[in-house]
Image (cartoon, grey):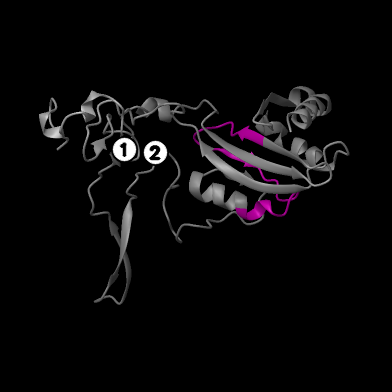
Amino acid sequence: MAVYAEELGRRLGEVFGDRVGNIEIAHGEVDVEVAPEDLFAVMRELRDHDGLRFEQLIDIAGVDYAAYGEDEWITEEATAVGFSRGVDGFTTGRLGLTGIYGIQEIRSNTGRRFAAVYQLLSLTHNHRLRVRCYAGDDNFPVLDSVVSIWNGAEWFEREAFDLYGIVFDGHPDLRRILTDYGFVGHPFRKDFPLIGNVEVRYDEERGRVVYEPVSIEPRVTVPRVIREDNRYTRPASEQEGGADA
């Protein structure tokens, strides 16, 4: 596995040169990054080049890298019983653009927030490849569509558009695919409220489904954390501070 991955990485470097960057090999898999302006040409050559022949597109996944590597679920303060709240209770997705992400940080235009990740398979050579491409504009992420290269990309790109708001230029029918007609926002963006914006119910008087602002209060919990230390040698009621309220 590692031998073929190293050979594939070397071949990619020879074929594409600096058009492909950050060639990484981990766990027997090859991961490369492509600039948005080179995406379409590189993808077409990945399919057509005799030494590559990635005939099949397995999947396209959208990714929101806002506050990548940050973690609100620091659980050192978790108690022995019940559930512990996240240490930072005001992060995005709960009460708006606050907390660890910060209004300025999440709205910054670095060109490194939204990406599409493509999983490719070469049936000819029995090779797999992961290609990552970051959209150049965080505020309006746009990437070239690869539907004309792999027809199976049509629904994958619609899903990434629906959930992350990534626009695929050249897609023949870029519509939402999972959310309802007229849905506002993109549910997998890290600035989208975890409770959503609206809720639906059937109105007996009107005889139809109606949309209303959400009525539930934001409440996010983290599962109980078990640790092998002296907090668990005595009943919770005897510990300092007692149990979580």
Label 2 and label 1: CA atoms lie apart by 7 Å
Q: Quadrant of the N terminus?
A: top right
Q: Residue at x 79, y 23 (%)?
A: 17
Amino acid, disc 1: Gly
| Magenta highlight range | 131-155
Label 1 sits on residue: 96
> In the rendered structure, does residue 165 fall within the stretch colored magenta?
no
In the displayed structure image, the side of residue 11 where residue 175 appears, left or right: left
Q: Quadrant of the C terminus?
A: top left
Front-lying residue, 240 or 192: 240
Tell me the chief SS of the magenta region: loop
Residue at (28% x, 42% y) in the render: 220
Crowdedness near tag 2: few (<14), some (14–19) or many (≥20) residues, C-alpha within 10 Å: many
Q: Which mark is residue 233?
A: none
The amino acid sitting under disc 2 is: Asp
Which structural element holds mark 2?
loop
* Residue sticking out furthest to the front: 233
Q: Foreground residue, 213 or 217?
A: 217
In percent of width and height, residue 233 lies at 21, 28
Is residue 61 shown above or below 228?
A: below
Question: In the displayed structure, would residue 164 be above or below residue 234?
Answer: below
Q: Which residue is mark 2?
A: 191
Image coordinates for residue 226, horizontal then vertical, percent:
30, 33
Of residue 27 and residue 36, the one placed in the foreground of this image is 27
